[in-house]
Image (tube, rainbow, N blue to C red):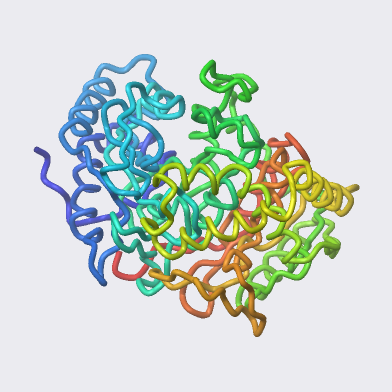
Amino acid sequence: MTTPSTDTTVCFATASDLLDGYRRREYKPSEVLTDHFAQIDRTNPATALGVNALTQEMRETSMNSALAADEAYARGGQLPPLLGVPLVTKEKHAITGLPVTQGLGTERAQVPTANQAIVQRVLDAGVVLHARTTTPEFSCASVTHSKQWGVTRTPWNLQAGPGGSSGGAGAALAAGMSTLATASDIGGSTRIPAGFNGLVGYKAPYGRVPGAAPLSADWYRSDGPMARSVADVALLQSVMAGRHASDHASWGDHGSDYLSHILAGNVESIRGVRIAYSPTLGGFPVAASIRANTEALVARLMSAGVHVDLVEPQWSVEQVLDAIFSHFGAIMGRALLQQVGGDPEELSGYAQLFVAQAADAAGRGTLVDSLAKDAVIQQELAGIMEGYDVLLTPTQGAEMLPADGNFTDGITLEGRHFENYMAAHMTMPFNVANRCPVMALPTGLSGVGVPTSVQVVGHPFDEAMVFRISAAIEAISEPLGRPDGF
């Protein structure tokens, strides 16, 4: 076994940097993986001082993969695009023979007989899959704790949650436990943890990344990549995206070159681009530090020659919450109840709240009524984006959510009380309008030391523009670095 180094820099490298280093023979995949294991041992324990982002490690099998990658680089020739890069998967992304519990307890586990499509695709691309990451129960929350796995925390502030539902993915990347991660998004579950952890997360248009049946048919859903840079997101999206026989809603070519969009995203290339900027997205509560960091980014964009106009959609926060919970009541809330045999008492408080609020919203109308609510939001979004290349808006309005929060009494944000704590996030309209590609990008730190973030929202299916502008935003932004002590 390779001895870990005392320098953890490689644990915070980008995939692009690792791949370049492997090709130059500056270090080996087995050495990088050993350093990641050492970082996990140091930072991951499920204590008040630990991040607790992983549900399972695969040390032996992943080291075998890393050693095989060492040999492949030594031989040279044509190599898989992500050979030797460490990656963690969200626990719900099925791996052959490994139980999927979704945080509901081992008695509820299902054991898949095949890899989920995106898992197989990243393995075919040569990643070193070394662990799986925590989620809230049934991925139904934007905090990440469960009776099964305990509390996951962001390394930026151990009192704060990492977001959810891909919270383990975000915390693991922010703490240097991996280089890449798979995520999923039905109400912000990729973008929220990317935002709270200073990362880049991408929600592709519905169907661009194949999902797992039957819930892949839910048109709010999207599986996708999370990483430390826009280029790394492009690398991972390139191998994950594209039509697959297991998901009849999937579309587009597999192996598309998303990096080509990045190369077009230099600062000079966005001169003259038109951006619609919505600071509150129709009245969401936004903390002062988040507003300030977003305004600073807007000023940098304008200095780079970007045309920015202020817009605000004419919907209310309550209207957005009603629409998504009407949808969840018809699909996800019932699916979660089915998983626990119809007994909500088996769930944590936030999951019980989700089921109850989804059932209440669904009871006020039919699925057709839910579609009508969606259509109002979609049409309003299309209206404010008309004549602009993208929409720019914060990812979340709250500086943090407590790591162990249940929010059964709702939440008070910027002096306003909401029955549902999802009012803390500004991601949901773009699951309602789920043909829109959306990138979440860091903008700085909040007043409580947790990263802040913006979303770059494209017109339906216009992925190239979102990647292009996101890469330029990254180029004009100061890097966050890494959390103190990590």
Q: Is residue 10 visible?
A: no
Q: Residue at x 34, y 70 (%)?
A: 484
Residue 207 horizontal/vertical position (percent): 62, 30
- Up the image or down, 382 lies above or below 418; here it is above
- Up the image or down, 267 lies above or below 95; here it is below
Q: Nearer the viewer, residue 340 or 155?
A: 340
Residue 48 horizontal/vertical position (percent): 26, 72
The image quadrant of residue 323 is bottom right
Left or right: 202 with respect to 377? Answer: left
Q: Nearer the viewer, residue 110 or 68?
A: 110
If the image is split into quadrants, where does the C terminus sit?
A: bottom left
Q: Residue at x 56, y 32 (%)?
A: 216
Q: Nearer the viewer, residue 451 or 362?
A: 362
Residue 394 horizontal/vertical position (percent): 66, 63
Q: Is residue 409 visible?
A: yes
* Mark count: 0
Residue 428 horizontal/vertical position (percent): 66, 54
Left or right: 135 with respect to 130? Answer: right
Left or right: 368 with respect to 189? Answer: right
Q: Nearer the viewer, residue 325 or 50?
A: 325
If the image is split into quadrants, where does the N terminus sit?
A: top left
